[in-house]
Image (cartoon, coloured by chain):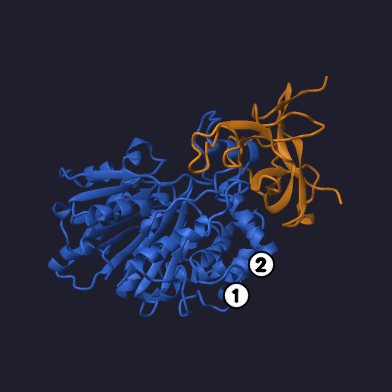
Chain colours: A orange, B blue
Amino acid sequence: MSKKRVPAMEGWLNMDESDPRLLGYLDESSGSYFFPKDVAISHAPGHADAEFKEVALSNRGKLWSYTTNHYKPPEPYVSPDPFEPYTVAAVELTEERMVILGQLADGVDPSTIEVGQDMELVFGTLYEDDENEYIVWKWRPVAA
Amino acid sequence: MSKNDVAILGAGMHPWGKWGRNFAEYGVFAIKAAMKDAGLEWKDVDFIVGGDTMRNGYPGYVAGATFAKAMGWTGVPIASCYAACATGAHAIEIARTRILAGMADVVVVAGADTTPKGFLAPNKGERTLDPDWLRFRLLGATNPTYFGLYAQRRMDLYGATEQDFAHIKVKNSKHGAANPNARYKKVFTEEEVLASPLVAAPLRLFEICATSDGGAAVVLTSMEFAKKHGVKNPVRVSAVSTVSPTFPNTTIDMPDFSTDSAAGIPVPDRSFKDSISYAAYQEAGVGPEDLDLAEVYDLSSALELDWYENIGLCKPGNAEKLLRDGDTTIGGRIPVNASGGLGCFGEAVPAQAIAQVCELTWQLRGQAGERQVHGAKVGITANQGLFGHGSSVLCTR
């Protein structure tokens, strides 16, 4: 029996495998977007009373930078055993003009990417237990 | 003399290291050294500010009280503050404004830390509303992850090389070798640095600052008190910047998942990091061209290059040239991190921004020994604390 795919954080992903998106907020009064919802609570100045509308953020942007971690991070990161290096990428969404961090998708060789290239969002597994696969967003290069 | 000047009559530090003792011991050691340097008695102090530490239990959250008790309660008012890596500058700002308001003449500012081994980690527990916890959980984004992002961007945008990053470490190790308060006094070669293991590519182990134990203190007084005390030409704090970002802040910062969005509101004229020293220059009425030295927060070797640009030593993209030309080495045009910087100290969070000011004090007095920047009269510190805390102190003499 295959494991159930559940979001690693409830409410952050649309969980639509055919059109994977992050869920964020739009403040229509200032035209500003926010992610993640409800965590780093922030507003545009003068818009602290704005009503937020939940929106699926766009899934394309340009690579702002990236780095590969070669040491096992402390908890609460759930590390595979043995530890495997992983790459964190920062991508600036073209439409929302905000940089969002995410791990680089499995199988992408970080030596083949460079700042400025087009990236897209996919879902990937962060870790799993006996019942579930815990899903997060990841970045991968847009196929040429 | 600027109307906002206050005097630095005393500076003191407990040497950085991994001593494993109570943080209050380091703070008290530094306070005693600063008091002796100032030629003042504990009974002369009329306000005490402590920089808090988050990793030493309750006494760390109320560092002002902890230091006051350890030195002996005298009934004077106290304050404690926390602003992550910017804690020291914020503590100095509380002291300075108290003096400028005419509510205190002699203020002690101290910070000290005892740190655990390895990566700085978030507090324990399932804390799904804390971005600092979530970034470890969902991304594995350690502090060096952010340093690695900045470093890689410099390589792709400006042609920085691994050799440049190693060069910074080598330069600072030469500076710090002569500093009795530094933890690491070994002089590194570029080959040694480049042979150390990758941590957050392109950054290597010897290019990422460690966490250290240490303590630093300064005694600040009004200019009038300094004169009465017989110090005619003290080193002065001429400006302190504790600015926060302006929306939209479009540079990714620890511990965030994302930047602000610039889709609706235009980006400000200056990035957050550029605005930190700018506010200090504006207040003091000096500019980067007036500087004799700078102490900047080299959490990674590559980050020092960003600071050259952020404090106005050169235009974006030119930091590598400044480094390669030797301008930022002692003896060059504008030495940076003459103390040895974090590369030689490792970070003792609430003490570090105060330690930067101690270095400027000794440099501006001409007491820095082998690492003396000849004829230094104007210096700046720059630093940034997690969650939007600017930190810059501009000193003159």
Give x and y (percent) for residue B323.
Answer: 56, 73
Tell me where residue A127 sits by quadrant: top right
Q: Are marks 1 and 2 in contact (CB under 8 Å)?
A: no
Q: Quadrant of the N terminus of chain A?
A: top right
Tell me where residue B1 sits by quadrant: bottom left
Residue in the foreground of this view, choosing between A33 and B211: A33
> Residue at 50% of width from left, 71% of height from top?
B313
* Chain ID of residue with mark 2: B
Tell me where residue A28 sits by quadrant: top right
> Residue at 33% of width from left, 59% of height from top?
B13
Quick one: which residue is furthest to the top in this view?
Answer: A1
Give x and y (percent) for residue B136.
Answer: 59, 39
Q: Along the horizontal axis of the image, is B201 left or right of B69?
A: right
Name the residue type under label 2.
Tyr
Quick one: which residue is furthest to the right in this view?
Answer: A144
Name the residue type under label 1.
Lys
Q: Along the horizontal axis of the image, is B12 left or right of B182?
A: left
> Residue at 76% of width from left, 48% of height from top?
A119
Give x and y (percent) for residue B125.
Answer: 52, 29
Helix, strand or loop under label 2? helix
Q: Which residue is mark 1?
A: B321
